[in-house]
Amino acid sequence: MKREFAASVCQEGEWYVAQALDVDVASQGETPEEALENLREALELHFEPPVPTQAPQIRRIEVEVSAN
């Protein structure tokens, strides 16, 4: 599904910052176009459904060490 977002772009020092005005997501780039492209990617990631992670498997091991 495609959604449209309003975005602002402003220059801060040597970087351009793009910020979505509808949600709290922002990104930056060396040009306004790059900042907007990075914002598109950040928005896609923001709205991506969460993926559960697997818990690490914890195991016990025996190791012989010298008593120095």
Image: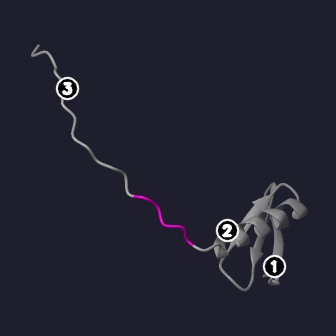
Closer to the camera in the image, 42 or 21: 42
Residue at figure coordinates x 83%, y 64% from the top left? 37
Left or right position of 67 against 45: left
Q: Mark 3 points at which residue?
A: 63
| Separation of marks 3 and 1 at Cα, in angstroms | 57 Å
Residue at figure coordinates x 21%, y 40% from the top left? 60
Q: Is 36 part of what is drawn in magenta?
A: no
Residue at figure coordinates x 19%, y 26% from the top left? 63
Q: In which quarter of the image is residue 29?
A: bottom right
Q: Mark 2 points at which residue?
A: 45
Left or right position of 8 against 64: right
Q: Quadrant of residue 6?
A: bottom right
The reply to whether callout 2 and callout 3 are in contact (CB within 8 Å) is: no
Element at label 3:
loop
Q: In which quarter of the image is the C terminus?
A: top left
The main secondary structure of the magenta stretch is loop
Q: What stretch is highlighted in magenta?
A: 50-54
Q: Mark 1 points at which residue?
A: 7
| Separation of marks 1 and 2 at Cα, in angstroms | 16 Å
Q: Between tags 1 and 2, which lies in front?
A: 2
Left or right position of 68 against 56: left
Q: What residue type is labelled 2?
A: Leu
Labels 3 and 1: the sequence-earlier one? 1
